[in-house]
Image: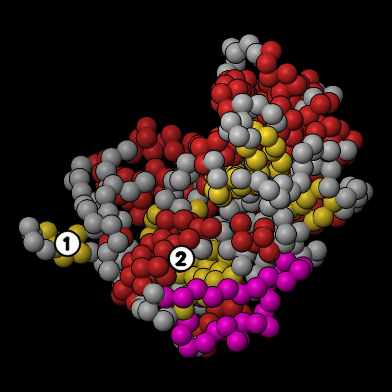
Amino acid sequence: MIPEIEELYQEVILDHSRRPRNFGELPDAAVRVHGDNPACGDEIHLAVKFDADGGLEDIKFTGRGCAISQASASLMTMKLKGKIRAEVVEMLRAFHDLVTDETSEAPKNLGDLRVMSGVRRFPQRVKCAMLPWRAVEQALEQRAGEATVSTEPA
Amino acid sequence: MHKIASTSVDWSALREDFPILREQAHGHPLIYFDSAATSQKPRAVIDALRNFYEHENANVHRGLHMLSSRATEAYEKARQRVADYIGAASADEIVFTRGTTESINLVAQAWGGKFIREGDVILLTVMEHHSNLVPWQLLAERTGARLRFVPVRNDGTLDLEQISSLLTPEVKLFAFTHISNSLGTINPVAELCEKAHAVGALTLIDAAQSAGHLPIDVREWGCDFLAFSGHKMCGPTGIGVLYGRAEILDSIPPWHGGGEMIVSVALEKSAFKKAPHRFEAGTPNIAGAIGLAAAIDYIEQIGRPAIFEHDSQLARYAAQRLTELPGTRVFGPKEERGALAGFVMDAAHPHDLTTFADQYGLAMRGGHHCNQPLMRRFGVSGTTRASFYFYNTTEEIDRMIEILHAAVRFFS
């Protein structure tokens, strides 16, 4: 097998793409964000419930997409569940650096998400990895109701 | 495994004409299966561009010096070459544009702006590329015209039984693709033109996927407009063609204003040249037109019937071999198909497949192929597309199947 392929599609990523965690509906969600990647037609529906302090009490997603976007969403929801708002913002920045910046050291607090670092060698796939994160970013801003985000600026 | 038994053309020798086919991709021999997006360029076209810039470069239609005469002559000869290539009655029916997209926008804006009114209908099909959909949406928004669509059947062909009920007298234009860029469907263009004309509608054919693959005869088909791009038929990027029947082109007001397209200019008002120069404001893509003529010369040396036979056999072979792969759905007609095969696999998303294949030197396209409504029609967000040209081989398709088998093992 080709090393670049194995680096991009690590076993953890394949596992999460085949059996995504936190995949499903969240009936009492405060915010629902619909995320689109117009480049490929992939979509994610992210549902978030906040606790009294505005932290992420629960987070689930549905939708369809490539292994990278599905695994990114699955790993992201596992990581962000129960985090306070400031931690989510910090992780969003750290994850973006992880998948785009050749020189960035993968910060320890990203945990399992560090398996996504292979994406940085595939610039066309950054949008796939970032799609669920764009949705969660919008959810934080939105706080309530529904919204749509896109990986392409409109 | 069946071999392609074809004409006397030495197809593998033609590969030598394409310098880029000697490239390696990620350490593997390049297999270029993305010619529906853009074709590769033969040495003859690359040389024609260089020759122009080294020996003929000047602006056209305005200088009196030697180089300007040479450039003008070469540019207008290219126009005649295009006219002959598609069976147009005259070079005056050939407008040079940037490509298919610009050609269609010219018709939508200049012709549509003059002749389309509220309540008129533009008939399209569900299989149109965004370039033959969005310009009409914009026109409809501006004028209050409506769009109607010929549905696509499960086998990827147009539902021709619906056409008579869709082609009502309100239809002013029927615009459709010759070959679908996702399904490979070859539409019966002459029949569609005849049906449209029976209700007084004009016709526009998007020949982007066919111009370099099939003989085209605008007079035999009876179409009013035909649009195509140079870069999908061995030519350079940034040059394309709009064919318009003479009497119709002459009835259309100018589109872009500027130099080259005027007879005289006063401060308040100008008089415009006749078609096609009326539609070519500013300095045109002179080298591009000359490169396109060189591409036409190259294609005609091989012969379009032979190219079509070769390419459609490759496409049928690919479509048939793809069905050997587990959990694979191939789109489009089984028998008659253009030079491509679109498919989805249960094992992997099109983007994962194309990323995987690329690491083995295999260039394919994954995504919606500017066909979002068509993808929705078939219940997918995208497909993987392998598209072919005469420089591709059955051996390359066999290698693709091996790589896809490896992808199934890896992603499952």
Q: Which of B243 and B132 is in front in this view?
A: B132
The residue at 42%/36% (across/down) is: B51
Q: Nearer the viewer, residue B226 or B43?
A: B226
Q: Mark 2 points at which residue?
A: B137
The residue at 39%/43% (across/down) is: B287
Label 2 element class: helix
Indicate the quadrant containing the C terminus of chain B: top left, top right, bottom left or bottom right: top right
Left or right, A109 with respect to A145, comes to right
Q: What stretch is highlighted in magenta?
A: B145-174
Parent chain of label 2? B
Left or right, B95 with respect to A112, comes to left
Residue A126 appears in the rendering: no
Q: Where is residue A53 in the image (x, y as percent from the top left)?
A: 58, 31
Q: Nearer the viewer, residue B145 or B221?
A: B145
**Residue B154's image quarter?**
bottom right
Give neighbour class at mark 2: few <14, some 14-19, many 20+ (Cα, 10 Å). Answer: some
Q: In this view, does A31 lie above or below B260?
A: above
Parent chain of label 1? B
Q: Is residue B331 above or below residue B59?
A: below
Q: Mark 1 points at which residue?
A: B263
